[in-house]
Amino acid sequence: MNVPVVLRLEGITKRFGALTANDDITLELRQGELLALLGENGAGKTTLMNILFGHYTADAGRVIAFSRELPPGKPRAAIEAGIGMVHQHFALAANLTVLENVIAGTRPLGALGLGSAAARTRLAALSAKFGLAVHPDARVGDLSVGERQRVEILKSLYRDAKVLILDEPTAVLTHQEAEQLYRTLRGMAELGLSIIFISHKLHEVLAAADRVTVLRGGKVVAERRASETTKDELAELMVGRRVARPHRESQAPGAIALRASGIDVGTTLKAIDFEVRAGETLGIIGVSGNGQHTLVRLVSGLERPTAGQLELYGAPAPRPSPRGFVAAGIGRIPEDRHADGAVGEMAVWENAVLERVREPRFSAGGLVRRAAGRAFAREIIERFDVRGGSEDSPIRLLSGGNMQKLILGRNLAESPRILIAAQPTRGLDEGAVAAVHGEILAARRAGTAVLLISEDLDEILALADRVQAIVKGRLSPAIPVEQADPRRLGLMMAGSWEDAA
Amino acid sequence: MIRFERRTHVPFGLRLAAPIAAVLVALAFAGILIAIAGAPVLEAYRRMLIGAFGSRLAITETLTRTAPLILTGLAAAVAFRARLWNIGAEGQFLVGALAAAALGSQHGLHLPPVLLIPALMLAGAVAGALLLLGPLALRLRFGVDEVVTTLLLNFVALLFVSMMIEGALKDPLAFGWPQSVPVVADAMLPKLVARTRLHVGLLVAIGLAVVIALVQARTVFGMESRAAGLNPAAARFAGVSLTGVLVKVACISGGLAGLAGAIEVLGVKAYVTTDLSPGFGYTGIVVAMLAALNPIGVVFAALFVATMFVGADSMSRALGVPSFIADVIVAMSLLAMLVALSLANYRIRR
């Protein structure tokens, strides 16, 4: 191949304490190429890109851009060399316009005025050239997530980026927005830009990239041309072994366990209607930030409806309270296990019993029955295969997957009649995802009514019987999962329920 | 290359070593100051030890000073664990002292001694608790930062005490000095050692430290308040009432500080003056931090701080070194302790 190499990482090694995040990584990017960096959480993708961009200093190795070695630890040098990075969490000022956001930081401190006329022309030219349509005078706060991402990309291009790095660019996008993004990236590559995007989603890597580099445990384990590999091969390379997600079998649902009719919560949830039957899973799909947080709080007993009614087992729900709902047989898996699901500094057993500590079996006369609590935790550890610590170690020592198994376990050990599972596999690796999915399916088989709130299409398709989309605090009507395909769900998530129907 | 690596678990021995190392570092630094002041450093520290423990009287004086520091230290430790930033122990101490003095005087309660003393201690605790519940209510209702309100209430409490002992509670027999009417003899705490100032308040303080340690480790309330302090969102999700926890913690914390004031009146002074507390409330914060908020540790931290203060007086008399050196040592050991606590979380790897 005679296409020039624009970027080369040589022998990059980075350690954090005992953990080797990057182990002697070497990779190349050629001009006009779309390279996907595929790997599970913790495989070292983001660390590698942060070294490339100068946010971290590598313990060993070199970064060479356009045949010149970059000085380590200097983001400005990376920018000047023509490298642009679009982070997972955008770095935009919501109260400024698109144009102002793009210019910000490019003008010398002493310059008079913003030079915005010239900038406007340049931005318009870039927009047109790369097919990134955004209105230069729109306030960023008013833009959709997809549009904000375009602004981020434009920001890099405005700084003459020749190499663009995108960290999990589709994590916050709907299916349609993601497809649009791939088309844009493809077009940019054809115009000579070189692009690396980080992902852990197999289908998008296959659809969008020219070449795939798979990272596992901080090492490059394989490189494939996208046209010469398959989803199964990539999955196995990424995880290191064959992982099969469990399968959902159809079964006839029972009586209605949980029903919401016309519920408002403040202004975040509006006229919510849904019902979940025993032995059935209702999936709520949506891009995060559309009211899921409040919905989870509502069904977890932390939020009181301002209008409408919540019914449990055909009768009005009691006054909302977390312990009241737990006592009523509702198992709750919070969205954010570190923030809401566990007290990191407390022992595993204390985390196992905290929500039930006032029940007679775990306390008497105000004193905690520590032996009973420990036994309960041991039972969960055994039954749900929680590894990485005993019942007495602080729960923060557990990995995300094991912490999630403990949270699942403390709910499922009690055979709940209803299970609220909010983003149950967010941030987990393939092995843990399979385990969590297996437990949720087992609970459904045992007759639990499952309310699954997720932004992961594959997860919804794998677990749910019926699907509703949540958009700006409203719920779409439910459709059976057999009628749901990515395109239709994407439309529902974008709020076009009629088009989707 | 030497690297620091975060420990997954801090061993017990190291947690014990951290405060000891902090104290040694503070003593070393203060040694420089003593040398600058022109005194022999080791001799100064020897004098200090003699001053604090060199005689029966010295020991009882040090322990008398320890008792209120244990209680104010516990007040801070209990509150800080639940992330209630009670900086108002000084004011709570003063209103507690005033309540005990007012009800314990001849115009106050008339009860047999077995009931009178507990009633007066309770009165002090209630007064202290009430003074903290105000700022807590403002925080819960309006989100007012309790650091500011509790701190400023210290001055309000001091001026209130001043007003009362110049007015309604003024002792007419005190030759015009602003001090309260003394409590009756029956209200005074029994002495632990005859003909010294050491009183049973010390045992009360140590007993409460043990009780609080047990409450934190073994009870539902202890577990819930620990969860609320460490991760309020997760505690809330698990059904812990944050408001309920904070109200109880405020009652305990303010109560302990108020009790410290009551015990100082009933055990040592018999009456209230505006200089009753040489900063017991503020020093309690230092004690709590030195103890890493551990209730049993508070007992030892209070003993250390009392030793420094009592010993420094005698060192000062013997060698002419300013007794402010005690403040320097205590303050430095606090700083060193904060550093030591975070260092204890790491290990060195080569």
Image (spheres, rainbow, N blue to C red):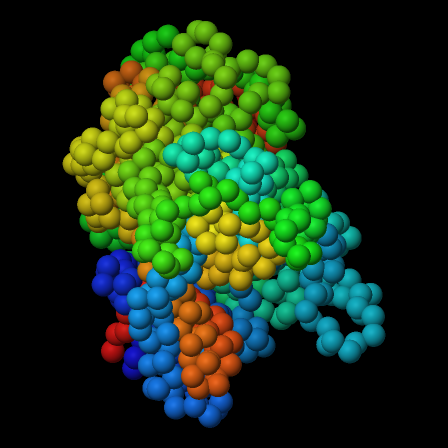
Q: Quadrant of the N terminus of chain A?
A: bottom left
Q: Nearer the viewer, residue A5 or B213?
A: B213
Q: Nearer the viewer, residue A133 or A348?
A: A348
Q: Nearer the viewer, residue A302 or A48?
A: A302
Above or below — where is A399 with respect to B61?
above
Above or below — where is A31 with respect to B138?
below
Q: Nearer the viewer, residue B132 or A346?
A: B132
Residue A160, image x and y in percent? 62, 71
Q: Give the side of residue A77 with respect to residue B188, left or right.
A: right
Above or below — where is A374 with respect to A95?
above
Residue B322 visible in the shown view: yes
Residue A384, image x and y in percent? 21, 35
Query: Which residue is painted at 73% across and 73% down in the image?
Result: A107
Q: How many marks?
A: 0
Q: Quadrant of the C terminus of chain A?
A: top right
Query: Which residue is painted at 29% across and 31% down in the image?
Result: A367
Query: Which residue is painted at 32% across and 29% down in the image?
Result: A366
Query: Which residue is painted at 55% across and 57% down in the image?
Result: B276
Residue B225, image x and y in percent? 41, 40
Residue A496 visible in the shown view: no
Above or below — where is A369 with respect to B188?
above
Residue B56, image x and y in percent? 30, 66
